[in-house]
Amino acid sequence: MIFDIAGKSKEIQSIISRYTKESFVTFLADFIRNNNFRGATGFSEIMKSKLKDSLYLIALRLSSKEEGKEDFKYNVPNEIILTDVVGRLNSIISNYLSSNYTPSYLNGNVEEQKKIIIHEGTFNSYFLNGVLNYRQQEINHVVSMFLPYQDKIKEKLGVELNTLVDMCNHSEDLYSKKVKNGYAKIIKSPELLNLFDLANKVESTEFRKLLSELSPSEFNLFMDFYEKPHSALIFTKQEFYAKFDEKETDIFCELFSIDINNEIDYLFYTDTNPLELKPIIKLNENEYLNIYQKQLPTSLYRILYDILGATQKEKTHLNHRRGKVVFEKKVISLFKKIFSDSKDFRLYDNYYVKGNEQDLLIICDNYALVIECKSSKIREPLRNTEKAYKKIKSEFKDCIQAGYNQCYRVEKCFYNEQEVIIKDKVGNVLEIIKTENIKDIFSLVITLERFGPIQTDLSLLLERESDDLVYPWSVGIDDLETFLLTLKKKTKSPLTKFIDYLTLRELLNEKVISSDELDICASYMRNPKKFKELANSNHDFILMEPTLQNYFDKLYYNGDLKFNSVQ
């Protein structure tokens, strides 16, 4: 029996269209931002992705012609309805790939099972994850990429690049101030939090009794939060006028917002969600709702890329700058920042060994880091496993496999020869490294994009000359930056800890199950001794908790993990 994804999606749309657009959208906007304070019960508990599922339901509601008659209030009846909706959505997501469970797969064909694992892991990582980095990192990506195009941006958009960045920051600042005057007081008060939790679970007479016991200020605070928990996410144009003029504010709102009254064309979960480009909803002529503020700098990056890359020539130029200029410069700057104060630190970029150009070589306290930077993208996975597998494998080969092959050329020289001669482009000798002085060699393939589970467990697709060869470490640039800055902040010897991690990380390939390298990094930071035991264990598989990277979140939001602004 064929599963009708379009029909099932329309069923969900019909169910949620009973609610007014504003009440439904504002509830989920608050849920996206604050679900960590709400607890995981009912619909929340069964969501595959709290972010992506919520964005999907918001866009699906906006795409409906129905006005809706009911205001969405979070109560028991609506919790039941929403749980049913999420259950239906889970069935849709599961059925995107279920047709690929062939008799060969079900009968235990190892090759067929491997293809399914790679396909499903990549598919879920691509569609169920948001941008897995920190807001300041996204801001830095925008500035470092587009700073040379300030005049063109001003000409095409009518506003300065720095102004757009400042407006993204101002949006977050407005939210933070409102939270400080509202949410924060609720969160810090166990009594008010408990009352909020009880609001829909107790008899109305008991609830009123509990309310009557509050002081007038607590009562007002609670009712504001209870009736309109999304209020901190709403802003007006006037709130921007203190720092920006009306024209700049109009441009900002036009660039990033969707009018709640405008019908959008959207149905399928795997379609590009319009909220990823425009993460603000215009509620009326004066009020705007931030659906997903962290997305603002990401959206700005995409908008500027499209505007400045209108022709193929312009796009080619941007792609070159994105990979060979901005990305590689970022990697070099990062390693210098973390390790250049070591006793012996030597860095060579765009160097040559035996006539082959290489990206980066770092010699630090007699350890050699052979590094290749790859900016290739992983595109949207296909639904058919056979076709998807070929495409995923091809993209892996062009990026991570190619990077490893380039690293291995140099790695072999360190292992097999007495000297490694480092030259520049014209053939001048930069250094002759005596390999007997090198304690260990590590190959790192750093990618601009994340590749999900095929990157965290390289045994799935990486080809090596021999099974005895150690695996390289492949990691996305944002994860690398987060990890290295944390090592710098939290350890006395970042290099020693980094080498320790690389040594143990090699052993996790072939058994680690994770789609996010930061979960693995967090496991090491939390308990290096236990991490070592896991790496050296004989377990067939090691499942990493997907919430481990909260370790880094806590550091970031406490101000201990800082990504310096790009100037």
Image (spheres, rainbow, N blue to C red):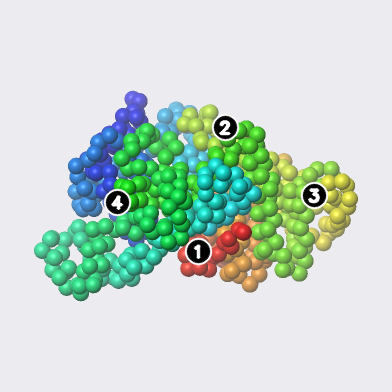
Q: Is residue 188 above or below residue 7?
A: below
Q: Amino acid at mark 2?
A: Lys
Asked if the residues shown at circle 3 and circle 1 are in contact, with their CB atoms under 8 angstroms apart, the answer is: no
Does residue 263 appear left or right of residue 145 in this picture? left
Q: Amino acid at mark 1?
A: Tyr
> Mark 2 highlights which residue?
391
Front residue of 510 and 15: 15
Quadrant placement of the C terminus: bottom right
Q: Amino acid at mark 3?
A: Tyr
Labels 2, 3: front one: 3
Residue 556 badge? 1
Alpha carbon distance from label 4 to label 1: 26 Å
Residue visible at 46% across and 57% down?
A: 244
Residue 27 badge? 4
Q: Secondary structure at mark 3?
A: strand
Q: Earlier in the sequence, mark 1 or mark 2?
A: 2
> Mark 3 highlights which residue?
351
Residue 229 at x, y percent in the picture:
29, 58
Does residue 303 appear left or right of residue 290 in this picture? right
Where residue 92 sits, quadrant-wise, is top left
Q: Secondary structure at mark 1?
A: helix
